[in-house]
Amino acid sequence: MNIRALIQKIKSSFNHHEEIPNEAVLGFLRVLESVREEDAPCDEIYARIDEYVEREVDKKDAAQLMPLIREHLDMCSECCEEYQALLDVLEKTSQDEK
Amino acid sequence: MGVLDALEHEQLESHSRSPGFKSLCAHNNEPLGSLFVLTFLSYIVTRRYNSTNMLTRSNEAWVSDLGTSGPAREAALEDLRAIVQKGLPYALSRWLSPDQPQFNSLVEEVTQETLLRVLDQLSTFEGRSQFTTWVHKIAVRIALTELRRKRWRDSSLDELTENEELPPPPGLLADPQAGPETSAERADMLARVRRIIEEELTDRQRQALILLGVQDMPMEDAARRLKTNRNALYKLLHDARLRLKRRLSMEDITPNEVLTLFEQK
């Protein structure tokens, strides 16, 4: 055990933590496979998501053109929900207009 | 002649046949008659401009109309209100049905808030997308933030009342279909992962994980609870995931290996 781990262990013996349920541990592990070193913050994704969704509606390969956005959407459930809702709006309103 | 043209032509005809108009002309009161015609024509031009502009306004026209004061801004706001209200039911379709009682008030509140935010953030529009897509994006963020908050509040209340009546759920280790050997392996693996989490995550990362992964709190609320913002909270979690991934790899454990163990019987 290295020194950092030892310090952490001593610290944790003083701080009685709320135990993380097994389901949450597994949920955390589920996203680890797709974690990349580089990831854009939510604000940057929000700033470009309208452009990304328009490209997708226009059948341009948005994920290939803007891969960082796709990767973030795979990791961040709230950004992904907003992306999905915006996609629904653009696809369905453009169908209405046809 | 289009439908709009025909309607306007008919209105002009009917006004020119009206007794008021005829009497104005009959009394040779030409300046007043001309004024009447000019006012009516100006009404038609404005109406026609607004109807066609709603669909055809360029990004520049939206920004310029909303950035001024007076009738152009009022007309642009009215058009934008209609556009937002048309889009919102689609945005909410995975969350709320239009038959639900709170639907109309939510749409109204979100529309109001969206228009205010659009005016407030007009200078930040960079023209990377259609102006209306940018506006829909703002409406989606406002609507989903409100719905997440409500969903979380309701589920927390439900949990509180359910916990009084029901025993806690059995948990993963109590899977009756798993044999004793699998159960022992699972318990061992979970203990290892738990120890790694304990050693690797800072208190703050751990708190974030509990708020988001256990309590299912929306990010905006969790960020407020931790006195930070959504961006920094995401970064906190991202760093936690990276640390954990590196440490698991150092211990020759892959996340998939753990997950597979819990899928087998």
Image (tube, coloured by chain):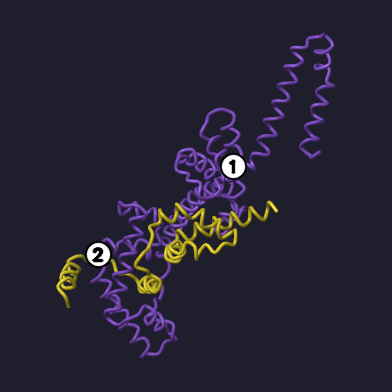
Chain colours: A yellow, B purple
Whether residue B138 is situated above or below residue A26 in the rendered picture: above
Q: Which mark is residue B202?
A: 2
The structure residue drawn at horizontal position 82% and vertical position 22%, both measured from the top left corner, is B16
Identity, as a three-letter code, of the amino acid under mark 1: Ser
Front residue of this view, candidates B240 and B146: B240
Whether residue B197 is situated above or below residue B5 in the rendered picture: below
**Cα separation between marks 2 and 1:** 50 Å
The structure residue drawn at horizontal position 33% and vertical position 63%, both measured from the top left corner, is B237
Q: Residues within 10 Å of mark 2 (few under 14, many from 20)?
A: some
With A31 as the anchor, is A88 left or right in this view? Answer: right
Whether residue B179 is situated above or below residue A20 in the rendered picture: below
> Horizontal and vertical percent for residue B139?
52, 48
> Horizontal and vertical percent for residue B195?
25, 75
Q: Quadrant of residue B38?
A: top right
> Horizontal and vertical percent for residue B132?
56, 46
The structure residue drawn at horizontal position 53% and vertical position 43%, both measured from the top left corner, is B109
Front disc: 2 or 1: 1
Identity, as a three-letter code, of the amino acid under mark 2: Thr
Tell me which chain the residue with mark 1 is part of. B
Q: Quadrant of residue B82?
A: top right
Give the SS element for disc 2. loop
Q: Quadrant of the N terminus of chain A?
A: bottom left
Give the SS element for disc 1. loop
Front residue of this view, candidates B3 and B117: B3
Q: Are marks 2 and 1 in contact (CB under 8 Å)?
A: no
Tell me which chain the residue with mark 2 is part of. B
Same-chain status of marks 2 and 1: yes
Q: Which residue is mark 1?
A: B58
With B235 as the anchor, is B145 left or right in this view? Answer: right
Q: Quadrant of the C terminus of chain A?
A: bottom right
